[in-house]
Amino acid sequence: MKGHDFRRWRKGLELSQKEAADALGLKRRVVQYYEKGERDGDPVKIPRTVRLACFAILSGIGDYHGPDKDNKKDKKDRDDERESAKDADKPEKKAKKKKKKSKEREDV
């Protein structure tokens, strides 16, 4: 995202620089630097976090309070499934190890 893209984002949402700064958790002066693309003659890069926040605001997301309780349950279920899959592989792995050891003994 370049400075002119940032400005177009702000204007597209009909936000003042102050409103955009408040929405992004920035100071108005930083918004000005981003739009200008420089600060005191040095180029200013818009950080990924700010670019992602711009997209979130554009998508109608005002704030994020973490995952829902349901999401935590889903994660636990996925973790349980992974553990079950690992446990199912264990007998197969043990059999392979035994086979390898017996082959090594034959070679000796």
Image: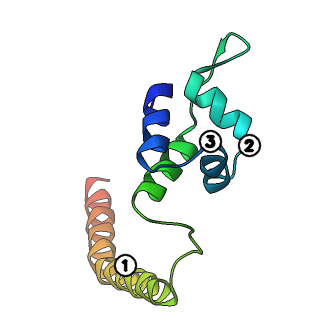
In the image, what residue occupies the spot 47% across and 66% down? 61
Mark 1 residue crowding within 10 angstroms, few (<14) / some (14–19) / many (20+): few
SS at mark 3 in the image: helix
Percent of width and height locating residue 6: 49, 35
Residue 62 spot, x, y in % from top left = 53, 66
Q: Which mark is residue 82?
A: 1
According to the image, label 3 marks what residue?
17
Looking at the rendered structure, the secondary structure element under dot 1 is: helix
Tell me which numbered mark, 3 or 2, is placed earlier along the sequence. Answer: 3
Q: Nearer the viewer, mark 1 or mark 3?
A: 3
Determine which residue is flagged by label 2: 27
Above or below, 35 relative to 54: above
Q: Amino acid at mark 1?
A: Arg
Whichever of labels 1 and 3 marks the residue nearer the N terminus, that label is 3
Question: Which class describes the residues within 10 Å of circle 2: few (<14), some (14-19), or many (20+)?
Answer: some
Q: How is the image coloured?
A: rainbow
Instruction: In the rendered structure, find residue 59 and report the number of the disc placed on it.
Output: none
| Residue type at numbered disc 3 | Gln
